[in-house]
């Protein structure tokens, strides 16, 4: 146990000490399908298999609630063009419904699309279903996620992220290749899924009117706001599937925990010494940095703890897909796996040996200021729906338990459902795709309309980015059309498309790729000083962006990349991922006939180019802040913020007159993450309209 950890310890440990009480025990082993009050019931038998052959997989399917009521369910699917399916987590909605449809060949000449808000879910589900159908991935069953398409002309069952289906809708608004579209995890209310709710509804109607291949729509979740969806889909039928295969016991902390990261480590080790080694743990945290800190603490504490050996696996969005999949690798017998995940593991995911979920109840959420377009990330309590989903990750292949590190009272006081992203997030990227699809972004019938000022602000931002010609009746400009060719946020595609003007496409591609990956620096707590010393050789006094570029360039030249990353305290996985992303972005540039040139050492060209896309992310030194530690800045939306301690500009004094940041993070304080010094007049040069608007707001 390191000293910091021990010193925070005593009080918390006393308060925490697994003082968790059983709140709900769900021991239901009955499955039933309820339709308009009618209930069909079937009792289950359970089997737990260690190794799954094809026959075992078929046996496992048969005990799933969805499978046991398949005939009735299929009757409903045949009868209705649109329906809502509600079923407990793990009941088999996502893996079984597409297979059942296919077993009766209901899809006809079309394909079945199943959307997921997260790519890790899309990939693992496709792999599971391919195994259950005894077929190779990418042939009959495939998946499509950003930067990775594993499908072929033969693919009939396609798992894809909501973002990828939205992109398909740009090319074909009627989504003609699909006869079934299943929008899964509807409760998550991502912007993309919310827009798809409307797109599929319109496509279904138009295909009907034009007598084209009919489109069937199924909306699925375990925890959604049924009334809202039923109304939106013209009073469509709702099928409730009751029962689950394995019970999950829920425990709540008896007392409020002041430091949830500490409470996590305590809980892990208290369970570690008292639970059989074949029970793996899944812990929900809020982001990569937090995961790395907890990972490091676990490794320290493990040295002094009894209990079986431990393997700790991180799981967060920025990890390359191949690395994310390592979480599914079996550990040797006698070893415990502890998965530290963000909410990407919250829905649709099955990690077979997980029997314990440890839930901090926190999530990192994106919000924005419509007046200035400035975005921020903040850590806050998750909804009840999210808590149930997290608990649902235990009890998938055997009975399980979920330990909530917050009180039952705290849980009861939380929102039942997630706040839809569409009412709190910037909509520029979505508006751009809607316009590209030929739809009117202002009148488009969304299930929960965003605040009108949010739509207006997003359109204004698109106008200032040069993507549309006007805000009242927006049409894509040539630049806007090109922006839709890149699978990234329009702010970043603008950087790439502007780069030739600044003679820096080579550098811009690398930097956008690195920014689209995750943290490339590896700072082990016990070797922090050494890692910081090594980092110095890459550091640019201009800031983090040029520093990141220096690292990436050196990485590309290094012959033995893994070894080189280890020696330089760099994250090999994230750098390799950035390398792959760069390749894909370059492919799009080549399709657009763009010429790749380099600005050499003229880094102000690169920074101006960055600013041409990220102009909403400026912060200015506050008057009187000179000399204050880390520098004090004010953002365009008026938030006071400090440069993040991990930045190379953290100790710069006096503060630079102006800086460009990539992210504004709100935890207990507000931090500007990944920053570079800029000249204040650059904003007027590269984004004059925004600069005027911003000055008026400040
Ligand atoms: N990758 C996997 N490995 C092992 N078992 C799996 C896997 N994926 C699914 N399963 C099994 O299939 C069951 C049903 O999973 P499925 O994802 O279809 O359920 P669901 O009802 O969609 O759940 P959720 O609402 O949590 O997404 C799981 O509980 C598990 O037993």
Image (cartoon, rainbow, N blue to C red):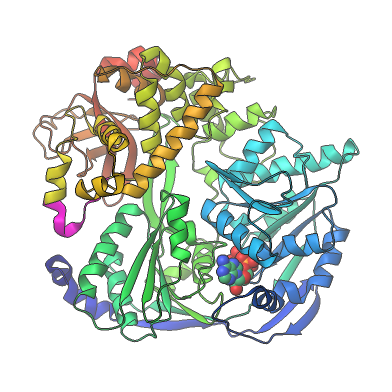
Looking at the image, which is closer to me, 146 or 335?
A: 335
Looking at the image, can residue 354 be seen? yes
Is 522 included in the stretch rendered in magenta?
yes
Left/right placement of residue 319 relative to residue 185 reads left
Q: Which residues are magenta?
A: 521-529
Looking at the image, can residue 18 be seen? no
Looking at the image, which is closer to me, 48 or 640?
A: 48
Looking at the image, which is closer to me, 395 or 691?
A: 395
Give coordinates of residue 98: x percent, y percent. 73, 60
Give coordinates of residue 528: x percent, y percent. 15, 53
**Depicted 36 relative to depicted 664: above or below:** below
Quarter of the image that includes the C terminus: top left
Is 344 included in the stretch rendered in magenta?
no
Residue, x 47% and y 81% (percent of image)?
A: 23
The tally of labels here is 0
Left/right placement of residue 8 relative to residue 396 reads left
Give coordinates of residue 9: x percent, y percent. 18, 73
Residue, x 15% and y 30% (percent of image)?
A: 655
**Depicted 140 relative to depicted 100: above or below:** above
Q: Residue furthest front?
A: 559
Give coordinates of residue 478: x percent, y percent. 58, 16
Quarter of the image that includes the N terminus: bottom left
Residue, x 56% and y 74% (percent of image)?
A: 396
Looking at the image, which is closer to me, 569 or 502?
A: 569
């Amino acid at each position: 146990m390191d000293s910091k950890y021990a010193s925070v310890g005593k009080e918390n440990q006393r308060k925490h000490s697994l003082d968790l009480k059983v709140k709900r025990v769900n021991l239901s082993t009955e499955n039933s399908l309820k339709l308009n009050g009618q209930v069909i019931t079937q009792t289950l038998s359970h089997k737990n298999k260690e190794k799954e052959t094809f026959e075992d997989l078929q046996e496992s399917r048969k005990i799933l609630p969805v499978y046991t009521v398949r005939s009735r369910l299929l009757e409903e699917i045949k009868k209705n063009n649109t329906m809502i399916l509600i079923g407990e987590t793990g009941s088999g909605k996502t893996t079984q419904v597409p297979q059942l449809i296919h077993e009766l060949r209901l899809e006809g000449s079309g394909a079945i699309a199943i959307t997921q808000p997260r790519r890790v879910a899309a990939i693992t589900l496709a792999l599971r279903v391919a195994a259950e159908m005894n077929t190779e991935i990418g042939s009959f069953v495939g998946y499509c996620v950003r930067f990775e398409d594993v499908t072929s002309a033969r693919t009939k069952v396609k798992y894809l992220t909501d973002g990828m289906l939205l992109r398909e809708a740009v090319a074909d608004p009627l989504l003609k290749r699909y006869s079934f579209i299943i929008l899964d995890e509807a409760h998550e209310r991502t912007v993309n899924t919310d827009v798809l709710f409307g797109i599929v509804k319109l496509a279904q109607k138009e295909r009907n009117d034009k007598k084209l291949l009919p489109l069937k729509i199924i909306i699925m979740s375990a925890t959604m706001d049924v009334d809202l969806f039923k109304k939106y889909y013209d009073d469509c039928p709702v099928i409730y599937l009751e029962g689950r295969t394995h019970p999950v016991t829920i425990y709540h902390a008896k007392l409020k925990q002041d430091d949830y990261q500490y409470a996590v480590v305590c809980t892990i080790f208290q369970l570690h010494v008292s639970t059989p080694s074949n029970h793996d743990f899944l812990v929900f945290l809020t982001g990569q940095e937090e995961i790395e800190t907890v990972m490091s603490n676990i490794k320290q504490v493990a040295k002094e703890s009894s209990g079986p050996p431990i393997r700790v696996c991180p799981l967060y969005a920025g990890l390359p897909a191949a690395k994310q999949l390592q979480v599914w690798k079996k550990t040797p017998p006698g070893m415990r796996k502890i998965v530290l995940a963000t909410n990407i593991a919250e829905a649709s995911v099955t990690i077979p040996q997980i029997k314990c979920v440890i839930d901090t109840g926190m999530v990192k959420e994106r919000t924005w200021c419509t007046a200035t377009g400035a975005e921020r990330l903040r850590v806050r309590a998750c909804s009840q729906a999210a808590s149930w989903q997290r608990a649902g990750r235990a009890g998938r292949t055997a009975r399980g338990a979920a330990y909530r590190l917050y009180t039952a009272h705290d849980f009861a006081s939380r929102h039942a459902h997630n706040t839809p992203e569409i009412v709190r997030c910037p909509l520029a990227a979505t508006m751009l795709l809607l316009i590209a699809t030929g739809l009117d972004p202002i009148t488009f019938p969304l299930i929960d309309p965003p605040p009108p000022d949010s739509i207006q602000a997003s359109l204004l931002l698109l106008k200032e980015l040069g993507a549309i010609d006007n805000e009242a009746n927006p049409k894509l400009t040539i630049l806007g059309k090109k922006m839709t060719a890149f699978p990234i946020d329009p702010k970043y595609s603008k950087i790439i498309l502007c780069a030739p003007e600044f003679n820096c496409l080579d550098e811009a591609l690398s930097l956008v790729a690195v920014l689209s990956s995750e943290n490339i620096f590896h700072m082990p707590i016990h070797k922090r000083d050494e890692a910081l010393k090594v980092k110095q050789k890459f550091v640019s006094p201009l800031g983090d962006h040029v520093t990141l570029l220096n690292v990436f360039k050196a990485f590309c030249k290094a012959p033995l990349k893994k070894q080189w990353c280890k020696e330089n305290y760099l994250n090999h996985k994230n750098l390799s991922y950035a390398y792959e992303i760069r390749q894909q972005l370059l492919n799009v540039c080549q399709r657009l006939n763009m010429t790749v040139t380099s600005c050499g050492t003229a880094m102000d060209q690169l920074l101006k180019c960055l600013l041409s896309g990220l102009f909403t992310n400026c912060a200015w030194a506050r008057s009187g802040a000179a000399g204050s530690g880390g520098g004090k800045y004010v953002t365009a939306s008026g938030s006071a913020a400090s440069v993040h301690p991990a930045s190379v500009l953290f100790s710069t004094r006096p503060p630079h007159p102006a800086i460009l940041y990539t992210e504004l993070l709100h935890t207990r304080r507000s931090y500007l993450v990944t920053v570079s010094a800029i000249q204040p007049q650059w904003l007027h040069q590269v984004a004059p309209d925004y600069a005027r608007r911003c000055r008026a707001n400040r």
